[in-house]
Image (cartoon, rainbow, N blue to C red):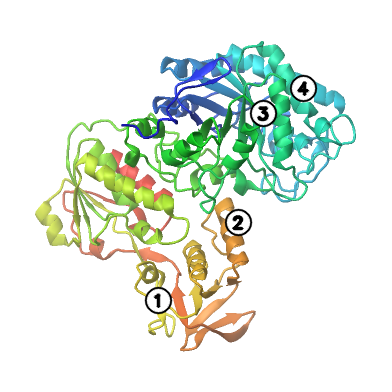
Amino acid sequence: MNSFRNLFSRIRIGELELKNRIVLAPMATNYGTDKGRMTERQIQYYLERAKGGVGLIVTESNYVSFEGRGAANRLGLYEDHQIQEHRRLTEALHEVGTPVCAQIHHGGAIVSMKGVGQFPVSCSTIPILTRGEPYFGNIPRRLSETEIVNLVLCFGMAAWRAKESGFDAIMIHGAHGYLLNEFLSPHTNKRDDRYGGNDENRARFLIEVVESVRKKLGPNFPLMVRLTGEELFDGGYRIDFIQKVSKWLENSGVDGISISAGNYDELERMVAPPAFPEGYLSKDSEAVRKVVKIPVGVVGRIMSPETAEEIIKEGKADHVYLGRALIADPHFAKKAEEARKEEIRPCIVCNRGCMDRLMEGIDIGCSVNAAMGKEVSKRILPAERPRKVFIVGGGPAGLEAARVAAGRGHRVTLWEKSDKLGGTLSEAIVMPHKEGIARLVQYYVRQMEILGVTIELGKEVTPDAIEKIHPDVLILAVGAEPIRLGLPGANLPHVFLAKELLEGKTSLGPLVAIIGGGLVGAELAEMLVDQGKEVMVLEQLDAVATQAGYIVRKELLKTLCQKGVKILVGTKALAITGKGVLVERFGEKEVLKADSIILAIGYHPRNELVKNLDVGQMEFYKIGDCMKPRMIMEAIEEGNRVGFAI
């Protein structure tokens, strides 16, 4: 019996009926061409999510005029020649019975000057100083009223092209600090003409766009608008303004509202890091839903069927938009509907494969889904000849290799020397906000059961054991071990490795010094300060937590500073004493007092087994951290690649 009855009930948005309440959120991929055209890669990306059971696909934003292009490889609907390329997408999705909505958009101030060959345009000349590369330092040119009128027509024509392309609905992008949102927000709109100065004037451009689009679409074609909910920064609007705007939109013929959040001043609200609760924007959608009769959808870290069901059941939204969750697992909806929720590959909210790559101007991927953007080439099909595969190591690299190899029909045995699967993932789950990591371990455990992988825990592999098993293929995924350094005093009883702390093998005093300000050291600092410890992080370099992406790092460092963690950079540890750590700072030596010392300096590959191994005629691979310690994304990618290679 399906426990997500509300989530899988039908809903109408205008004349469009959806089979369930799950919508693929519009997310830029950088899979398009530099002419704004759809590519086969992009079509396959959307098609896989349609086959995965979503009720509606909303494409990434399509720019309505060239100067509004967000990046070089985004989609466009600003010229007629793009119609035929988009029609390839709509026809492919209609073949599998999934409706598709085109999002239309103008980047406003949030475009790269290099990408459009001119200064960006906006409602006002507000320098972009806090928004990160490639937008840092942008000074937008103020649009004239004549130019605004022309852009209103551009939105209408883009909507017409989308309809001609076979799309089933249109969504106007009025969120995230792009042009329409810049007009709405008093933070950016400093105009004193008919497009600024009060609530009605700041909403005028959006309403005129809606009217232009509606005229081109006709009275019954489904039309939605995406809005940023409450802006929490100084000078931003509050939810009561968006309630008013939503009512005006409803009166103007809009069939649905989609609530998102954030802009490039508060990226953490647009693509929330792990510290944000699941469904954190549902209070905004609930507020809007109270004042309109049209359907209201919501996005915002909706990572589980339970969260999605709760939002619908409690009346906080009429449908939910899933973004990163559907990047991680395109078949999220189908698995939830078929009561296979434990088979859903979870998003771990690291943002490395998606948002971080997007901000770098490159095509997006996914840390946990190596098939993201490679849906055809990475489709698991039976191998020509089943082989006997032996995998040593049950971390993410080994588990992914086992999943793919067993899925292709190979006979897979995996040995793990500890008493549980997951490798370093199993250690990390004790730290704050690691629910996604815990779900990932559970996902792999379930996959091993389903695929019939033989798992041996507590088994340490020797060359003799390998010779006895005599596999056709040997895959070493034995991971890495922590670096202790050659510091004098590193073996004192009050000095511990980060690994020992995560395994619960320590008893710490009230004042803790962490040597090493990488991501592990920074996250340990948050965990310890939450336990009531006074924490100091010592980093030899000039920055900490640099392995984390921009959004995750910003939120982590903000949290550490708010909680009083003392972070010292440019600080070299020279020795550990009974009283603390002898360091060198600014050419001077001093002892920093600490009761307990944690070494979080990093890892080095485990190579002992390799040194003593004679692989003979076996096909042999090394993957994951035993090659070079890196992040989850690299480990899973290597495991996936080898799983396909054998």
**Residue 92 versus residue 402 in the image, above or below:** above
Give the image location of residue 261, x and y in percent. 63, 41
User: Is disc 2 in contact with disc 4, using a CB cutoff of under 8 Å?
Assistant: no
Q: Earlier in the sequence, mark 3 or mark 2?
A: 3
* Residue 563: percent from left, percent from top: 59, 67
Q: Residues within 10 Å of mark 1 (few under 14, many from 20)?
A: many
For the residues labelled 4 and 3, the Cα–Cα distance comes to 14 Å
Pointer 2 residue: 554
Q: Residue at x 60, y 42 (%)?
A: 283
Nearer the observer, disc 4 or disc 3?
4
239 relative to 223, above or below: below
Q: Earlier in the sequence, mark 1 or mark 2?
A: 1
Query: Which of the two residues, 615 or 606, is positioned nearer the viewer here?
Result: 606
Say which element carries label 1: strand
Give the residue type at disc 1: Phe
Mark 3 vs 1: CB contact within 8 A: no
The residue indicated by pointer 4 is: 208
Pointer 3: what residue?
A: 105
Query: Which residue lies under the disc numbered 1?
Result: 496
